[in-house]
């Protein structure tokens, strides 16, 4: 069996999840494009990854050293609230905090969203986990 590239991935589902992750990276939503431009290259002072596998999930954005998952929710999330709650619960069990923003929040006021993300990151004790 192939060894996962990142220590956060579930080795049993890695191959499928990794293929899906690649598809998501190649086809970001408008809100994800905006956020990536604002979060990449440590613009918040913290290293952020996009479309990163954690367990069997693909986080939109994550700061591994702070164990913070940042999700940008489109309209589909209105119909999958129960799944999102279970996913958040599992990520919390793995030690990750999850914060969510809507596509509309990102598109209409991305500076406020980035400020909230930076404030959250700055308030989390550094866990000294490799990026």
Image (tube, rainbow, N blue to C red):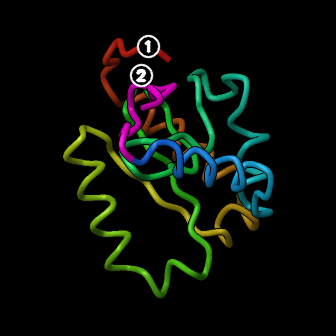
Nearest the viewer among 84 and 124 is 84
Residue highlighted by disc 1: 130
Nearest the viewer among 23 and 131 is 23
Give the mark nearer the N terminus: 1 vs 2: 2
Residue highlighted by disc 2: 65
Q: Mark 1: which secondary structure?
A: loop
**Farthest residue, direction bottom:** 79
Q: Are marks 1 and 2 in contact (CB under 8 Å)?
A: yes
Instruction: Identify the image quadrant of the N terminus.
Output: top left
Per the rendering, the mark at residue 84 is: none
Count the numbered circles shown.
2
Q: Quadrant of residue 65?
A: top left
Question: Gap between marks 1 and 2, in whole Å?
Answer: 6 Å
Task: Judge whether 90 appears above or below 78 on screen.
Answer: above
User: Can you give x and y, in whole percent of width and height, for residue 28 in the image?
Assistant: 76, 57
Q: How many residues crowd mark 1 within 10 Å: few (<14), some (14–19), many (20+)?
A: few
Residue at image position (69%, 47%) is 22
Task: Judge whether 4 appears above or below 21 on screen.
Answer: above
Residue at image position (33%, 45%) is 97
Q: Mark 2: which secondary structure?
A: loop
Nearest the viewer among 77 and 103 is 77
Question: Is residue 107 toward the left or the right of residue 67 in the image?
Answer: right
Nearest the viewer among 44 and 82 is 82
Q: How many residues crowd mark 2 within 10 Å: few (<14), some (14–19), many (20+)?
A: some
Which residues are drawn in magenta? 1-12
Q: Is residue 47 magenta?
A: no
User: Can you give x and y, in whole percent of width and height, for residue 116 in the image?
Assistant: 52, 47
Viewer-side label of 1, 2 = 1
């Amino acid at each position: 069996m192939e060894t996962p590239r990142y220590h956060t991935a579930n080795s049993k589902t890695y191959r499928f999840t990794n293929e899906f992750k690649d598809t998501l990276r190649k086809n970001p939503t408008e809100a994800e494009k905006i956020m990536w431009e604002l979060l990449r290259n440590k613009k918040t002072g913290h290293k952020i990854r996009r479309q990163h596998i954690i367990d069997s999930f693909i986080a939109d954005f994550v700061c591994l050293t702070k164990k913070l998952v940042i999700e940008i929710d489109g309209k589909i999330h209105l119909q999958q609230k129960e799944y999102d709650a279970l996913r958040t619960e599992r990520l919390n069990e793995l030690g990750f905090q999850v914060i969510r923003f809507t596509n509309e929040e990102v598109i209409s006021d991305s500076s406020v969203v980035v400020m909230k993300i930076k404030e959250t990151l700055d308030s989390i004790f550094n866990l000294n986990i490799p990026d």
